[in-house]
Image: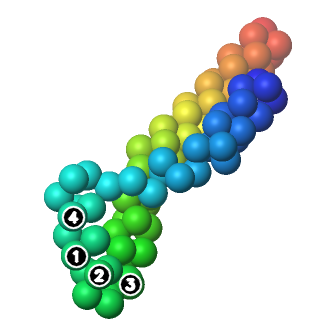
């Protein structure tokens, strides 16, 4: 498990330039705004893209954690009821 996490982090760090990419329409609009002297919009769009990218992973982690805790509690209850007999 540690190896998988390390490989994932290495890939993210090595390919950091690709993380800030946008779709073609967003890119042309942001380049136009940036050339007109408004770089703040580009930073906001990139932050929004990263936010939207992280939400599905966060949801899966929360659901997985809740499932894990529920499974552990069910096993504990089953073990306690079996030992009470």
CB under 8 Å between discs 3 and 1:
no
Q: Residues within 10 Å of mark 1 (few under 14, many from 20)?
A: few
Give the CA distance from mark 2 to mark 4: 11 Å
1 relative position to 17: left or right: right
Q: Nearer the viewer, mark 3 or mark 1?
A: 1
Q: Nearer the viewer, mark 3 or mark 4?
A: 4
Q: Which sits earlier in the primary sequence, circle 2 or circle 4? A: 4
Residue at position x 41%, y 44% in the image = 56
From this viewpoint, which residue is outermost toward the front?
35
Is label 2 in contact with label 1 (beta carbons under 8 Å)?
A: yes
Q: Is residue 75 above or below residue 11?
A: above
Which residue corresponds to the image point at 21% horizontal and 53% vertical from the top-left?
24
Q: Is residue 54 left or right of residue 27?
A: right
Q: Which mark is residue 35?
A: 2
User: Given contact means CB atoms under 8 Å apart, are the residues at marks 4 and 1 in contact?
Assistant: yes
Q: What is the spatial separation of the Cα atoms under label 3 and label 4, in whole angstroms? A: 15 Å
Q: What residue does disc 1 label?
A: 32
Sequence-wise first label, 3 or 1: 1
**SS under mark 4:** helix
In the rendered image, residue 6, in percent from the top left (x then y), is placed at: 76, 34
**Who's the residue at 25% across and 87% down the image?**
36
In the picture of the structure, the residue carrying the numbered disc 3 is 40
* 2 vs 4, front mark: 2
Number of the label disc, if any, that sits on residue 28? 4
């Amino acid at each position: 498990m540690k190896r998988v996490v390390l490989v994932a982090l290495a890939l993210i760090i090595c390919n950091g330039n690709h993380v800030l990419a946008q779709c073609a329409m967003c890119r042309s609009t942001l380049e136009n705004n940036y050339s007109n002297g408004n770089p703040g919009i580009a930073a906001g769009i990139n932050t929004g893209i990263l936010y939207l990218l992280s939400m599905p992973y966060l949801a899966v982690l929360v659901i997985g954690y809740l499932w894990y805790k529920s499974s552990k509690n069910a096993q504990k209850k089953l073990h306690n009821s079996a030992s009470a007999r």
